[in-house]
Amino acid sequence: MAYGRQPTGVRTRATLLALGLAAAFVGAVALLFLRLAHWAGTHPVPATLLTALSLPLLYALVRGMPRARELRRAALAGMAEADAESVAAEPTVVLPPSDPRDGLTVPLPEPSVDLTPDGFEEAVADLCRRDGCTDVEVVGGAGDLGADVLATAPDGRRVVIQCKRYAPTHKSGSQDLQRFGGTCWTVHGAQLALMVTTSTFTDPARDYADTCGIRLIDGPALQAWTTGAAAAPWGPARVS
């Protein structure tokens, strides 16, 4: 499950540009500080009044930062709730028990750590096919740019999946999520991004996934999806 890397020249130019911008910012701040210090020395009374007036503003800004984070979390939660309502509002197709797309009635062999990485990707692709996805393609390997399985969900969304076949004691960390998050939306055009692992995820990884809108499928959730105890990550099949 290799990831594409930018050419060395591109990374070097980006690094130099970032350093130049940082140096310019620091220099501007230092120059502004020196000018303010000089002005305060020559105008002590106005400087004292200005400082007294700015303290409440700074206090309000500091107090408002946690509030901004709370509002952002609430907005994300609202988007998820709206998505769930839109799914519930549309008619669903009840598939017969014999239909191979019915993930709740036709369980497949459970993907496990005994599989090779390529075998695990194929097993996840089989789950996608079973649960109504079309255009399912295993693309993992050198130069995959963070995607192992591509598919189209029953409702038409583009699904991009990253697979991590790990031992139960090897958790998927935030670095795995950050690499995947850097390509799933912009490079692969995901409308539904999933990371599937045979183990579990660290707390920082879950926090990053919540922020970026990536859905996580850990070992227990994968088992439930495989055996039909839970629906597929994209929900039941839908028709327009």
Image (spheres, rainbow, N blue to C red):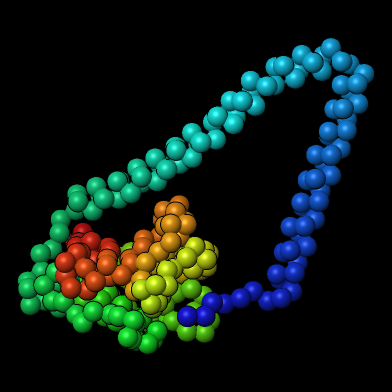
Extreme residue toward the front, this view: 169
On screen, residue 16 above or below 22: below
Question: Which residue does the image show at 74% across and 57% down from the upper left?
Answer: 18
Q: Taking the image as drawn, is residue 3 in sight?
A: yes
Question: Where does residue 26 sit, x and y in percent of width and height?
Answer: 80, 45
Question: Where does residue 173 sit, x and y in percent of width and height?
Answer: 47, 65
Q: Taking the image as drawn, is residue 159 in sight?
A: no
On screen, residue 53 above or below 173: above
Counting labels gives 0
- Of the 4 image quadrants, the one containing the C terminus is bottom left
Question: Which residue does the image show at 15% across and 56% down from the upper left?
Answer: 91
Question: Which residue does the image show at 34% across and 42% down from the upper left?
Answer: 78
Which corner quadrant of the image does residue 191 belong to?
A: bottom left
Question: Where does residue 131 sit, x and y in percent of width and height?
Answer: 21, 72
On screen, residue 196 above or below 191: below
Question: Which residue does the image show at 78% across and 45% down from the upper left?
Answer: 25
